[in-house]
Amino acid sequence: MEIRRVRFRQSGGFAGLVRGSEVAGDQLSTAHRRALERHVKAARRTSPAGDSGARDLVVYELEVETDAGEVRLEFDEAGAPEDLAALVDDLASRARPMAP
């Protein structure tokens, strides 16, 4: 699977700010790409999770554009997959304010 582009969106939290960034797939490190590929494949095999019911947590959305189509991953800061933490940190450091 080829990851072409990743769109990152961070929203929620106490202030409810929305920030985002975008990165081309070839700019991802090998470790980030492999972790993301595992989650994209798993997301295609399962149905999306429902709302966790958590309030005032930061929510992360990753829209992953691949050669096989687009997959959307969403999780809050309490349920963030450990193997995606470094990628989320990297994308968050690039994020800029955006419209909700």
Image: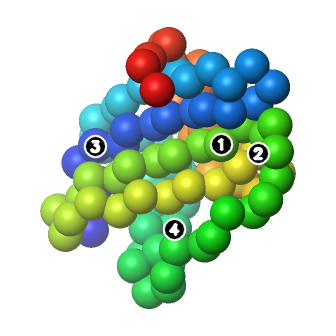
Crowd class of label 4 (few under 14; some 14 to 19; many from 20; radius 10 Å): some
Tell me the distance, in whole angstroms, between the alpha carbons under discs 2 and 3.
22 Å
Q: Are marks 2 and 1 in contact (CB under 8 Å)?
A: yes
Residue holding disc 2: 77
**Residue at numbered disc 3:** 5
Rendering colour mode: rainbow
Is residue 12 toward the left or the right of residue 46 in the image? right
Q: Quadrant of the N terminus?
A: bottom left
**Which residue is denoted by mark 1 in the rendering?**
59
Q: Earlier in the sequence, mark 1 or mark 4?
A: 4
Q: Quadrant of residue 12?
A: top right
Q: CA distance from mark 2 to mark 4?
A: 16 Å
Tell me whether circle 3 and circle 1 mark residues in contact (CB < 8 Å). no
The tag earlier along the polypeptide, 3 or 4, is 3
Disc 3 secondary structure class: strand
Provide the secondary structure element on which disc 2 rests. Answer: loop
Give x and y (percent) for residue 42. 49, 78
